[in-house]
Amino acid sequence: MARTAHLGDADDPITALRELALAFYAATVHRPWLGAYFLQDAGTQLNGLTLYDRMGQQLMRLDLTPRQRFDGVAAVMAYVVGVAADRGQDPPPEVRDGRVERDEFVATFRAGLRELDEDAFPFLHHVADEFAAHDDAEQFRAGLDLLLAGLRLQAGQSA
């Protein structure tokens, strides 16, 4: 958390909130256990409370009600920590022990999606190729930006 103390100084509070969220995401790259750690009783963990408060301070700069700020921080924290916890999971045993390469595993997964009944799973067929081609960090930023756009809209600001 000490490395993020300088974050949050941006003129735009949404930009500052985005910087904080991206810093946490970046920290999880080298500490895959961090997301799961933050999921544990965050109310008693100083680092969790610090991140929560820093994010909340940004929303205090917006024309939102206390409830909207509370809901906004809760949504961003849930997204950031949830994605981090998901990314921190161990890969499947066959990938972990080297029997299967990651790319081969993803290709098999994608093929399995294509084998599903297209009428029953039209969306999965529609996005099957994205599973192999997406970048986790890019996908994280896209989801975060959707949340932040909603907060900006709620505060009556334009991008």
Image (cartoon, helix red, strand yellow):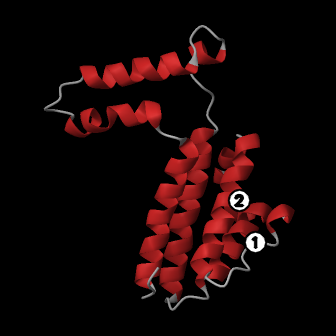
Residue 130, which numbered label? Answer: none
Answer above or below: position of 71 versus 117: below
Pointer 1: what residue? 7
Specify whether residue 156 is in view.
Answer: yes
The x and y percentages for residue 42 are 68, 60
| Mark 1 Cα-neighbour bin, 10 Å: few <14, some 14–19, many ≥20 | some
The x and y percentages for residue 151 are 47, 77
Pointer 2: what residue? 23
Q: Residue furthest left?
A: 119
The image quadrant where one finds the N terminus is bottom right
Given residues 61 and 86, the one toward you in this image is 61
In the image, what residue occupies the spot 41% across and 17% down? 108
In three-dimensional space, the C-alpha distance between marks 1 and 2, rounded to whole angstroms, equals: 9 Å
In the image, what residue occupies the spot 61% across and 82% down? 12
Answer above or below: position of 73 versus 66: above
Amino acid at dot 2: Ala
Amino acid at dot 1: Leu
> What secondary structure is marked by label 1?
loop
Q: Quadrant of residue 130?
A: top left
Q: Are marks 1 and 2 in contact (CB under 8 Å)?
A: yes
The x and y percentages for residue 152 are 47, 80
Q: Please report whichever mark, 1 or 2, sits nearer to the chain's N-terminal start.
A: 1
